[in-house]
Structures are given as structure tokens and as C-alpha cells.
Amino acid sequence: MRIQILGVGCSKCEKLAQNAETAAQESSMDFTLEKIGDMAGILEFDVLQTPALVVDGRVCCSGTVPTVDDIKKILLESK
């Protein structure tokens, strides 16, 4: 599973990355975590607000920081 965090490195972006990593680890999933911080890369996903969570190329949320449990649900639905 490929998890991408879109954002310029603010505290919300870092928190989303931490929550996503924790959720994937606690769900015992094989994953790679990538942070995309350049505007060109972010705009490729047509995202208007950051931070954003992308799972396997699909934008799952943007402009919010979901909890670890919320991200677990997103990851399980994306399997």
C-alpha cells in the first residue's frame, strides 16, 4: 500500500504523517509512506487544501487531520 501525505511541512502535515504511519503499523499492513511537499506535486492531485491523505493514488481526505482510528478505517476500505 502506498500512503502519501500532501503538505508543505506544517504541524498538521506532520501530525497526519504520524497518524497515518501509526495506523498502518497497527493494522499490520505493508506500506510505504511518502511526503510530498512541493506545490507542483500537490497540485497533481487536484487538492485545494492541505494536509491531504492519498492512499494508492486516491485522495481520501484533505484539509483535516483524521485520527489514527479514522485512518485505519480508510486503509481497510482501500485494501
Image (cartoon, rainbow, N blue to C red):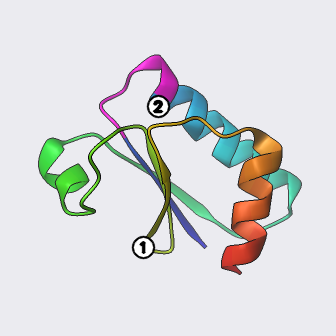
**Rendered view: 13 above or below 53:** above
The amino acid type found where label 2 is placed reads Cys
Relative side of 37 to 51, left or right: left
Quadrant that contains the N terminus: bottom right
Front one among 22 and 68: 68
Does 52 lie within the magenta span?
Answer: no
Residue 60 against residue 65 in the figure, above or below = below
Residue at mark 1: 57
Amino acid residing under circle 1 = Gly
Left or right, residue 32 beside residue 26? left
Residue 10 pos. (x, y %): 39, 21
Residue 72 numbered mark, or none: none
How would you rate the neighbour count of disc 2 (Cα within 10 Å): few for under 14, some for 14-19, many for 20 or more? many
Residue at the top extreme?
Answer: 11
Tell me residue 51's x, y (percent).
42, 38
The numbered mark at residue 13 is 2
Residue under the point 46% across and 31% down:
13
Residue at position x 87%, y 52% in the image: 26
Q: What element carries label 1?
A: loop
Span colored in magenta:
7-12
In the rendered image, residue 28, in percent from the top left (x then y), is placed at: 85, 64
User: Relative to 57, does residue 35 appear above or below in the rendering?
Assistant: above
Residue 7 occupies quadrant: top left
Which element carries disc 2, helix, strand or loop?
helix
Residue 40 is situated, as x and y percent measured from the top left of the image, at 12, 51
Real-space CA distance between mark 1 and mark 2, rounded to the nearest whole angstrom: 18 Å
Question: Outermost residue toward the bottom?
Answer: 79
Say whether residue 20 is visible.
yes
Where on the picture, by quarter, is residue 27?
A: bottom right
For marks 1 and 2 on the same chain, the one whose residue lies earlier in the sequence: 2
